[in-house]
Image (spheres, grey):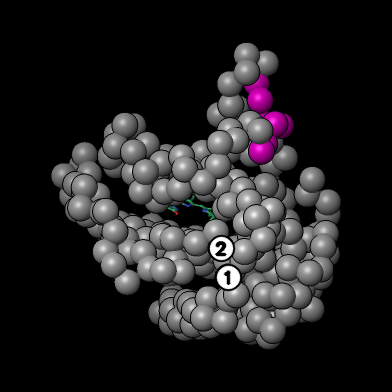
Amino acid sequence: MTPYWQEHYRHLKAIDGKTKLQTLAFQSSKIRLYRGLIIEGDNAMQVLDFALFPEPEYDVPIFCASFFTASNTNVVVLDLNPLHDVIDTEDYKAKYYKNLMPLGQKYAELLPWGSKITGESLGFFSPIVIWSKFCSDQHLHDILFAAFKEYFKAWLQLMDQAKVETNASQLHRNCEAQHKYLIWRAEKDPGHQLLKKLLGESLAQDLVWNFLFNGVNTLGSKSFLDYFPEYRCVDGSISKKRSIIGKSFENRPWDAKGNFIGANIR
Ligand code: BLA
């Protein structure tokens, strides 16, 4: 692992003079970007946003941990976000998630489903996603930490066993899938409002586009609207709305075998 070009973002001070933001990033031969952001504010506000992106030669899922805590509420996403479709097709799901379903099922029973969620986000999640909201409780925090360790270990194993892709069209497909994911999060991640409040508009934009979702300017040339045309306003700009289809999925839309049992999200 080599430290990445992160010095500029290493320690950031928020406008309020109290909240501290720290980042770290690395890369290695198989991992394009391994980065984390920690925020510690007053009133016990805490954020961990941790993600690992494989090199496009590997179609391994993206490791994603996004934990937000404030005034007793915890908002949690922990997942191996799929690079390719796991709702309508079987092959990618069988390749990476079939063996992980018991792990996902274990934590689906221990942590409550977080209720309704931005519909578009579901398309980026896997059958083992942990999407949860709960009041602060040491027992649930311990479960979440155990889940984090197990998911991370599972991801490292997938990465270890991953075979390098040499087929040019498959490589392009991996690149584009990662680019679509990055541009979705760079444009619509729910953390942006808070980052803007803490850092001001331009530093928040810089952090999001150049650090957190690095690769968004290099892995592909399509625009957000090319991938998500439903967000186009009449004047050609991107709708400011976070979601076009709104929030849905009151209950977990995956069964224990990894079949999608929710309503159509397209
Ligand atoms: C809330 N974060 C959320 C929600 C989701 C995610 C699904 C619930 C709101 C919703 O339904 O949209 C996370 N959404 C994701 C992830 C993906 C996605 C991981 O589509 C991946 C594809 N969260 C952060 C950071 C901050 C943060 C860095 O990652 C703050 C700096 C905060 N997340 C945050 C806050 C909320 C939230 C404040 C609650 C506010 C809200 O619901 O809009």
Q: Is residue 78 left or right of residue 70?
A: right
**In the rendered image, which residue does mark 1 sit on?**
164
User: From what the image shows, is residue 51 above or below residue 105?
Assistant: above
Label 1 to label 2, Cα distance in Å?
A: 5 Å
Q: Can residue 228 be seen in this snapshot? A: yes
User: From what the image shows, is residue 96 above or below residue 191?
Assistant: below
Kindly indicate whether the residue at mark 2 contacts the one at mark 1 (C-beta within 8 angstroms). Answer: yes
Q: Is residue 238 left or right of residue 191?
A: right
Q: Which range is magenta? A: 227-233
The spot of residue 224 in percent (x, y) is: 59, 35
**In the rendered image, which residue does mark 2 sit on?**
57
Q: Is residue 125 left or right of residue 94?
A: left
Q: Mark 1 is on which residue type? A: Val
User: From what the image shows, is residue 61 above or below residue 97?
Assistant: above
Q: Quadrant of residue 231?
A: top right
* Crowding at mark 2 (Cα within 10 Å: few <14, some 14-19, many 20+): many
Looking at the rendered structure, the secondary structure element under dot 1 is: loop
Looking at the rendered structure, the secondary structure element under dot 2 is: loop
Q: Nearer the viewer, residue 11 or 170?
A: 170
Q: Nearer the viewer, residue 187 or 145?
A: 187
- Say which residue appears at 67% left-offset and 36% top-offset: 228
Query: Which quadrant holds the C terminus?
Result: top right
Q: Earlier in the sequence, mark 1 or mark 2?
A: 2
Q: Quadrant of residue 128?
A: bottom right
What is the number of the mark on residue 22?
none
Q: Mark 2 is on which residue type? A: Glu
